[in-house]
Image (spheres, grey):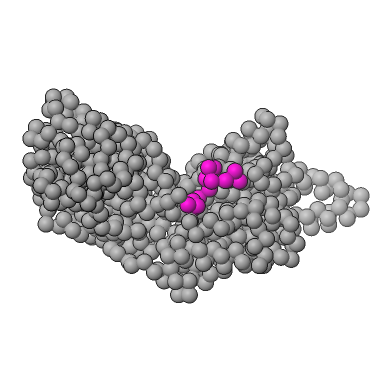
Amino acid sequence: MVLEKIQKPNDVKKLPAWQLPILASEIREFLITKVSENGGHLASNLGTVELTIALHRCLDFPEDRLIFDVGHQSYTHKILTGRKDDFDTLRKYGGLSGFPKIYESDCDAFGTGHSSTSISAGLGMAVARDLQHRKNTVVSVIGDGALTGGMAYEALNNASLLKSNFIIILNDNHMSISPNVGGMSLYLAGIRTSQHYNELKDNVRSALQGIPGIGDGLADHISRTKNNLKQLMVPGMLFENMGVTYLGPVDGHDIAALTQIIQDAKKLPRAVLIHVRTQKGRGYEPAERHPEFYHGVGPFDRETGRQTEPVRKTWTNIFSDILLRLGEQDNKIVAVTAAMPEGTGTAAFGRRYPDRFFDVGIAEEHAVTFSAGLAREGYHPVCAVYSSFLQRGYDQILHDVCIQKLPVIFAVDRAGIVGRDGETHQGVFDLSYLRMIPGMTVIAPKNMREMQAAFQFADCFQGPVTIRYPRGSCITSLSEYNAPMVYGRAEILFAGSDAVFFAVGSMVRTAVHAARILSAEGISAAVVNLRFVRPLDRETILRELSAHALAVTLEENVLAGGVGEAIAAMSAEEGCGTRILRVGVPDRFVPQGSPEELKKKLGMDAGSVAARVRCALGRKAPEAAQGAEVPAAQAAQGRADRQAPEKPADSPEGPDGSGTPGEQNRGNR
């Protein structure tokens, strides 16, 4: 096998040219096999095999810098830099990341995971190279979908000032995750239909120079006015008009052509963009037919393409059904998404109500302010976005929505610990940054029925509302507890005398399971479903604090600025004297791994929570659990946290579900 000859960076340079197509075929087979076993990003990686091989033929690693936008197309790069044997650990805890990581390899020039960042990072590296008088090559690879993000244009504008070489590869595969929308998609389509422009220009110059006496002068005159010709032949010539040299388009599956154009681009003393056309999902027929389904996918049968993990009803599915019902009841409901109609569950609404559905591209900032404009004119927009991507629209939420008290509903999917995509995709910051904004209402439903009630409430509420919910299968247990949804009011699920749990959203289930563990040991714990993170139910919280010596807050969010911090401050202000034990994500970024595995390591699973409560109350662990290892990952928080808990016996907490088929982690775009 040719692939076996690739053991370390730059080995691909040693291969004769005739073996490169064989290498590409073997890499595709390897990727299909490994992703079918472990899940991961498939279609995007299959589409960039030849492009990555060509880049590795032209660059020297790790001296040269290769930056992938988002990074979900970097698997071939990992293989060519000696990480092939680690693919059995792909996206597993402690294993190979699904994205470039600077701590994983010195050949990964820049850590990525979100869209439209590569040109900015690459330009910074190019300028740093010049300041240090080095000669290495810097290449940024960006997809046509990522060019719908405004940050890419800010970087292109800045790149036009560069007086040294910087290469931008535009990977044009006609889509990001879902089919591309907007003016950039139409612009690139125009370029694709004008691919003979450069050939025609050369032929015209040759013909003019052949005219005796006047040919050279006429050719020079036309050369001085070549921009007029470009405007006729290539619609807009956007990149050249911005001061970036444009080369292409070139077939992204022709290694020889790609290698030649990259070598040519390296000679230019300025920023240059190479337009490369690729096919997403190439080499695997199911992924070619349904690239959006195979963008981010769980384990599947490679012969049939079918998912091997059971399909469960997810929170995203429930939201999709709720949105359809809202749209039916209220013709002022409109849906907005940022290039994620399938991933956010808004696609079905778009099919039924196309005039009220807006996919704005990979542009969260625009999505938020666009929603604000709709709300100002009497509509009720539902802006659906993943938690980790909503961070990009924070200023717009504060400035354009909340200051004006506009009734925008933010449907925040993938809130909490997401899992295998790692640090860039964990949705563990939204409660902290949203609950500090005046005028924002934040609701975290515990189950399907409460989610339905939350959206009905939001549809009637005259102000901004955020409804946040996790990834994975929707909780249908706890359905017997469903007090009416009242603004700012919590729900008491259980009474108890020894301790009280204040739980948020997905952590209500954990609190109930922990309370059951403790109940079997003779420890009585009350459980309060907070429901509203902003405003908090001050009356209920203070009443329960005064009635219990120990309070435990549970949130799938960072502890800094979270609900636990707010309740601890409330207790201190009122002089309650109650010990507060805060359960949440400590002051660190959460790596990749299954949600269940990560929660256990962070001390956020039901068994770990029960152990910490037992320790805080000074109770002994059950005999079966005595002497067991303490969960080391849970950081100390307050007086109760400084005591090391014993690890309990097996927790009864069930799996959260790993996501939907065709999972869209657009960072991934």
Q: Residue at x 38, y 57 (%)?
A: 343
The answer to whether residue 590 is left or right of residue 511 is right
**Rendering coords of residue 326 (x, y %):** 23, 56
Q: As rendered, which of 158 and 432 lies closer to the eye?
A: 432
The answer to whether residue 532 is left or right of residue 90 is left
Residue 106 highlighted magenta (yes or no): yes
**Rendering coords of residue 282 (x, y %):** 56, 66
Q: Is residue 383 visible?
A: no
Quarter that holds the N terminus: bottom right
Q: Residue at x 11, y 45 (%)?
A: 523
Q: As rendered, which of 603 and 342 lies closer to the eye?
A: 603
Q: Is residue 243 visible?
A: yes
Q: As rendered, which of 177 and 619 lies closer to the eye?
A: 619
- The residue segment tinted magenta is 95-107
User: From the viewer's perspective, is residue 408 above or below residue 91?
Assistant: above
Q: Check the image and name the residue furthest to the right.
A: 213
Q: Residue at x 54, y 63 (%)?
A: 31
Q: Main secondary structure of the magenta part?
A: loop
The answer to whether residue 346 is left or right of residue 646 is right
**Rendering coords of residue 617 (x, y %):** 16, 37
Q: How many marks?
A: 0
Q: Residue at x 56, y 39 (%)?
A: 121
Residue 277 falls in image quadrant: bottom right
**Rendering coords of residue 42 (x, y %):** 50, 61
Q: As rendered, which of 192 and 644 lies closer to the eye?
A: 644
